[in-house]
Image: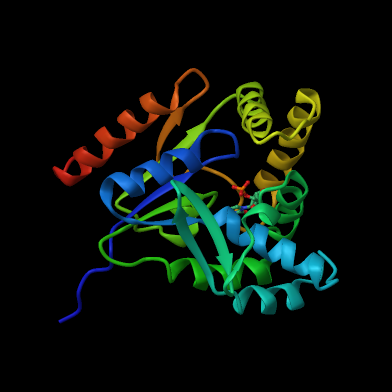
Amino acid sequence: MTSSPAPVIAVDGPSGTGKGTLCVRLARRLGWHFLDSGALYRVVAALAERSGLSPGDGPRLGRLAATLDIAFREVHGGIRVHCNNEDLTEVVRTESCGAAASKVAALPEVRAALLVVQKGFRRAPGLVADGRDMGTVVFPDARLKVFLTASPEARAERRYNQLKQQGINVRLATLRQDIGERDVRDSARTVSPLRPATDAVVVDTSDLGIDAVFERVLCLVSDRDAGGG
Ligand code: DC
């Protein structure tokens, strides 16, 4: 007898919509595993730079991506990103690594290798997956698909406040521009472009605090558990 695969909640959308915070809270509340798929692309970009690989070398970067042993560990209430037993959290959280990740994410070889890595995170009792193509490509059979949106202004302001809290000084106008450029790159690429799955529930978080978004999505989870939608 084959058992059915562990359930998945797929949360997609551009950066700055509150996906990360929402997913960590959901995973904690449900006692499920958590996948920050953006961190996988960031790790590939960081390790490629460290090894002096060209960011456009698809075959080599694909091979590198296939060797990664990545784990998300909760330490003092925060999520740490470990790769091959090295803590890369600080390295992958920088703006420059995010921009480099968006470039390597356009390479089909990297996406193919990380597809396998991402599917490996699907384990009982369930998985909350944060990304751009969780509902469309990686987990098309997800129990619930949520697509978060927000205006570029709201997203830039959130990111600005996040960085300020971490003691990092950036200009709001620069962030707004970077977000615009990354949106174009992530939405226009031919492999797995950023778009909502046809069966995703779209939630605009421009004027919603994280608590309101969390409650809204918890209601959607309960609806699905009750057999609705
Ligand atoms: O969510 P993030 O900012 O950590 O993602 C970094 C980059 O990785 C982002 O510009 C797009 C890419 N990405 C992707 O293409 N597919 C995913 N599932 C997650 C991230």
Q: Position of residue 27 (x, y in %)?
A: 35, 49
Q: Is residue 153 visible?
A: yes
**In the image: residue 38, left or right of residue 103:** left
Q: How many marks?
A: 0
Q: What colour scheme does the image use?
A: rainbow
Residue 94 vs residue 184, the one in the foreground: 94
Q: Is residue 142 left or right of residue 105?
A: left
Residue pictured at 38% horizontal, 26% vertical: 211
For residue 156, above or below residue 126: above
Q: Residue furthest front?
A: 76
Q: Nearer the viewer, residue 158 or 207?
A: 158
Residue 101 lies left or right of residue 57; in this view the side is: left
Q: Residue at x 75, y 71 (%)?
A: 58
Q: Residue at x 61, y 22 (%)?
A: 154
**Screen quadrant of the N terminus:** bottom left
Quadrant where the C terminus sits is top left
Q: Residue at x 53, y 40 (%)?
A: 13
Across and down, in percent, residue 142 comes to 34, 55
Q: Is residue 229 visible?
A: no
Query: As drawn, which residue projects farthest toward the top?
Result: 207
| In the image, residue 116 above or below residue 128 | below
Choose top left, top right, bottom left or bottom right for residue 87: bottom right
Would you identify the image quadrant in which residue 191 lies? bottom right
Q: Residue farthest to the bottom? A: 1
- In the foreground, 220 or 73: 73
Residue 204 vertical position relative to residue 11 in the rendered view, above or below: above
* Residue 52 at x, y percent in the picture: 86, 71
